[in-house]
Amino acid sequence: MQILPASWQAAARSKRLDIHSRIPKKWLLSDFDLEKAERQRNLTGTFIESFLDDDEKNIIAQDSVSLTEKIKSRQYTAVAVTQAFCKTAAIAQQINNCLHEIMFDFAMHTATELDQHLAESGTVKGPLHGLPVSLKDQFHVKGYDTTMGYVGWIGTYEGSKDPLKVHQTESQVVKELFFRVEALRE
């Protein structure tokens, strides 16, 4: 469990640094790019796409039905799809601080397992096989903070420091989503 600094400002700064540290170095924007972003009125579309390669642009332009069909037919891998969306989220985070938690490592690990499953069995694990998801910061994910934007909830369970609850609880929707992933490991 994370030890919180004395002031809320220090706690917020510490959390931002922790989140930033989970962005892969190869996805970090230069100071020049960050300054350029500050001058932009529209950070979506062509601006954010300027940091992506053509394959990544094609992937993030697809809707969920198209993505899952292309993963199933092996036109795309779950790893490629997940990486494209994680990279896009990492870029957005650096520009406007929009993520409360980053779970890119977990997402990439899961995508790798899903690709292995598809290669070995020839079948997908349900209709959302390989489709990355983003959760609102109201759902508890074991091992991560759920703060709903409250600095005082960093390192706690809804403000409680009970070690039986802090980072030990998962919301039902998370259990349902991750149950399918856990079933791969059996």
Image (cartoon, grey):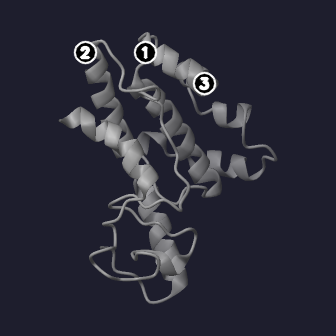
> Which residue sits at x=56%, y=75%?
150
The number of callouts visible is 3
Q: Disc 1 marks which amino acid? A: Lys
Residue on which disc 3 sits: 57
Q: Disc 2 marks which amino acid? A: Ser
Using the numbered discs, state the Cα–Cα distance from disc 3 to disc 2 in whole angstroms. Answer: 29 Å
Query: What percent of the width, then of the height, locates residue 90?
Result: 52, 45
Question: First in sequence: mark 1 or mark 3?
Answer: 3
At label 1, counting other C-alpha atoms closer than 10 Å, the crowd grade (few under 14, some 14-19, many 20 or more) is: many
Query: What percent of the width, then of the height, locates residue 84?
Result: 50, 31
Disc on res. 95: none
Residue on which disc 2 sits: 121
Q: Disc 3 marks which amino acid? A: Lys
Looking at the image, the residue that sits furthest to the bottom is: 6
Residue on which disc 1 sits: 72
Label 2 near label 3: C-beta < 8 Å?
no
Kindly report which numbered mark, 3 or 2, lies closer to the viewer in this rendering: 2
Quadrant holding the C terminus? top left
Q: Tag 2's secondary structure?
A: helix
Quadrant holding the N terminus? bottom left
Question: First in sequence: mark 3 or mark 2?
Answer: 3
Query: What percent of the width, then of the height, locates residue 83?
Result: 45, 32
Q: Tag 1's secondary structure?
A: helix
